[in-house]
Image (spheres, rainbow, N blue to C red):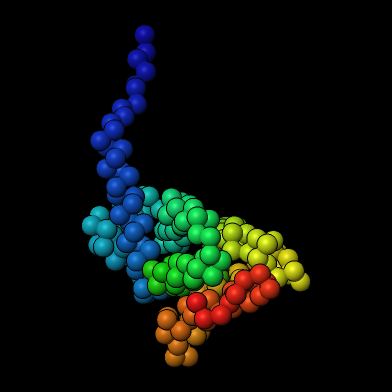
Amino acid sequence: MVKVKRRYSSPRREQQAQETWRAILDAALELFTRNGFAETSVRQVAERAQVSEQTVYNGFTDKIGLLHAAGLEYADLSAGREEAAFLEALRAEPDPLKRIRMVARGSREVWESGAIGLEMLVVNREIRDPRMEELERISRQHKLDGTRETCAILFPDEFRRPDLSLDDIVVFATAVDAGSVVKTVLELGWTMDQWEEWLVQLLMLFLDPAKVSTSDR
């Protein structure tokens, strides 16, 4: 009788593997967004995560695979509990102007977390690889879906300008609240305080002034 070798599964071992995977992706996100793709090596990621280079290669194949996984992880995180909690708080705020300020501040915090560098790596198409094309599609769809959900809360029928549809606003907001825009205004000398206030003023233009007072609040 031939004995079938049973697969050994240890919860502790699986937890350690998850912790290692998490540490590698955290290190990759930090280094890619801070230093860029070309300037970041697998060795640097391994050292930052306190693992061997071979461990990184075993989990992600190569540096593009690492960037692909890091980008997908970032999209998953930004669509997770924190975003759900933020949208819940946004719905609970009755004042449409305060809602807009909440969104502008939230967007600022995302860009300040390093998202600009990651978005530039994905959308600039400097890396020719099918995995990056997939990541770009997923990232764009995630951004569009998130913007649509946010705009639906900010600009319901009772507050939205009657000459604009929700789709009109989503298109504009997606284009304006982009890493390339934030990067450009910062390079031209603006501060994040200025950018945040500029975003607030732009979003206020979509409110119906007959129903919402946009005077200095």
Q: Where is residue 9 in the image (x, y as percent from the top left)?
A: 31, 29
Q: Is 41 situated above or below 196?
A: above
Which image quadrant is residue 5 in? Answer: top left
The residue lying toward the viewer, choosing from 66 and 210, is 210
- Looking at this view, name the residue that lies furthest to the bottom: 189
Q: Does the rendering let one see residue 63? A: yes
The residue lying toward the viewer, choosing from 128 and 183, is 183
Residue at 44% of width from left, 61% of height from top?
Answer: 67
- Looking at this view, name the residue that lies furthest to the right: 163
Residue at 40% of width from left, 72% of height from top?
Answer: 112
Q: Position of residue 189 (x, y in %)?
A: 44, 91
Which image quadrant is residue 117 in? Answer: bottom left
Residue at 50% of width from left, 55% of height from top?
Answer: 92
Q: Where is residue 118 in the image (x, y as percent from the top left)?
A: 45, 68
Tag count:
0
Which image quadrant is residue 32 in? Answer: bottom left
The residue lying toward the viewer, choosing from 194 and 175, is 194
Q: Does the rendering let one see residue 182? A: no
